Amino acid sequence: MASIPPHPPDTTNTTGTTGTDTTTTAMANKQNGTGRNDGQTPDAALSTDVQQGEDGAPENSVQKRRLPVISVRSLTKTYLLGQTRVRALRGVSLDIYPGEFVAIMGPSGSGKSTFMNLLGCLDRPTSGEYWLMGTAVSKMSPDQLADVRNRKIGFVFQGFNLLSRSSALDNTALPMLYAGLPKEEQQRRARRVLQLVGLGSRAHHKPSQLSGGQQQRVAIARALVNSPALLLADEPTGNLDSRTSVEIMAVLQALNQYGLTIVLVTHEPDIAAYTNRQIHFRDGRIISDEMLAQPRRARAELEVEAVAAPPAGGSTIEIREERL
Ligand SMILES: Nc1ncnc2c1ncn2[C@@H]1O[C@H](COP(=O)(O)OP(=O)(O)OP(=O)(O)O)[C@@H](O)[C@H]1O
Ligand SMILES: [Mg+2]
C-alpha cells in the first residue's frame, strides 16, 4: 500500500488537465500513440508535463512524479442523528492518480458512499483536507463546490437517475443546461458522447424504451458530457444482471483506457476485478489498498462469449475513439 505523504500535494496544476477537457486530452494522447492501454498502471503519457513531486511515497515511480487527481488527508465525517453521532469516516488518507481505475469496497455502512459524496463535492468533511487536481476543495463555499462539481466531476449512480419523460439525448445534455452553450452545440456534444458509449442510434428513446444497461450508458454519457477529469460511480452495476454489468464495465474500462480517472464503489469482487486498484473500507477507515496486476478485461470476455453464443441482434457494446 502506498504510504501517505505528510503534507499537502503541490498545488500547481501542471497536468494540463483543466477539468474541461481531460477526456479529450486523453483521447488525443491515445491518438498520438502515447495513451494508456495496458490497463494496469497509469501510463507515462499523461504525466509528461507533470512536475516531480517531493512528497510522494507511492510505490509506483510513474505515479510518484504525477499530481494526484484526488488527494485526501485525515478525512472525517460525523453525522448528527438526533443526539447520536455517527462517525461515518474516521480519518481517511489516500492519493488517486490520473488514469487510475479504483474500486472502493467494504461492508454496508463502512463509509463508501459517504467517502464518494465527499470526493464528489456533494458534501463537506467534518475535518481533514481534500485536494482535487491540486485545488483545496475542503474549504470551498457551497457555490464554489457546485462549480467544481459541475466542471470536473461526472457521477453515475446505481439507479441511473434519468428523467423519464426526456429522451436519451436530452438526459445526456442536462448537465450543460447551465454552461451557457448554444442549444445546437449542446445537442451536438450530447450526440457525440452518446455515440461514444454506443448509443448513437438510441438518442431519441426515452428511458422506458431502453434496457437497464442502455439506461446506465445514458447515465454514463450524461456524466461525460462536460468532459470531467474524474468519474465517480456508486454501485453502477448494482441494478444490472451479470452480463449487462460486464458490458458496463467494458464501457468504463474503455473510457479509462482513454485516460479518464474512475472511482467506483462496488460490493462485488467480480466487478472490482475489472479495475486496477482495490481499496477496502471498514468502519470508516481504509483497511487495505492494493494494485491489481492483471485486471479482468470486460471487452475481451464479451467477445469470447459472443463467439461462443452470439447475442441476438449483435453486440450492444461499441466504443468509438472520438473527440468529444
Ligand atoms: N445522512 C446521514 N445521516 C446520518 N447517518 C448517515 C447518513 N449517511 C450515512 N450515514 C451513516 O454513516 C455510515 C456510513 O454510511 P454509508 O452510506 O457511507 O455506507 P456505505 O458503505 O455506502 O454502505 P452501503 O454499502 O450500504 O451503501 C452508516 O452507519 C450510515 O448509517
Ligand atoms: Mg453506499
Image (tube, rainbow, N blue to C red):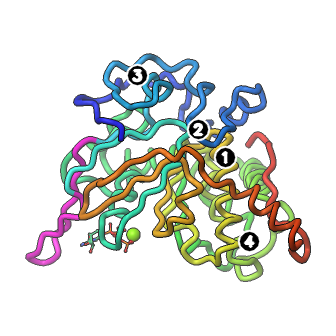
Between discs 1 and 3, the one toward the N terminus: 3
Find the residue positioned furthest to the left: 83
| Residue at point 60%, 43% (across, down) | 260
| Residue at point 26%, 41% (across, down) | 73
Mark drawn on residue 12: 3
Mark 3 touching mark 2, by CB under 8 A? no
Residue hosting label 1: 181
Residue hosting label 2: 20
Mark whose residue sits in front, 1 or 2:
2
Residue hosting label 4: 167
Residue type at mark 2: give it. Thr
Q: Is residue 238 above or below residue 127?
A: below
Mark whose residue sits in front, 4 or 3:
3
Mark 1 touching mark 2, by CB under 8 A? no
Q: Secondary structure at mark 1?
A: loop
Residue type at mark 4: give it. Ser
Left or right: 143 in relation to 25: left
Between discs 4 and 3, the one toward the N terminus: 3
- Whole-percent x, y for residue 44 in the image: 59, 25
Q: Is mark 2 within 8 Å of ligand 2?
A: no
Q: Is residue 225 above or below residue 159?
A: above
Q: Secondary structure at mark 3?
A: loop
- Work out whether residue 249 can be spotted: yes
- Whole-percent x, y for residue 246 in the image: 67, 65
Between discs 4 and 2, the one toward the N terminus: 2
Mark 4 touching mark 2, by CB under 8 A? no
* Residue 244 is one of the magenta-drawn residues: no
Count neighbours of disc 1 (C-alpha within 10 A) and say few if under 14, some if 14 to 19, many if 20 or more.
few
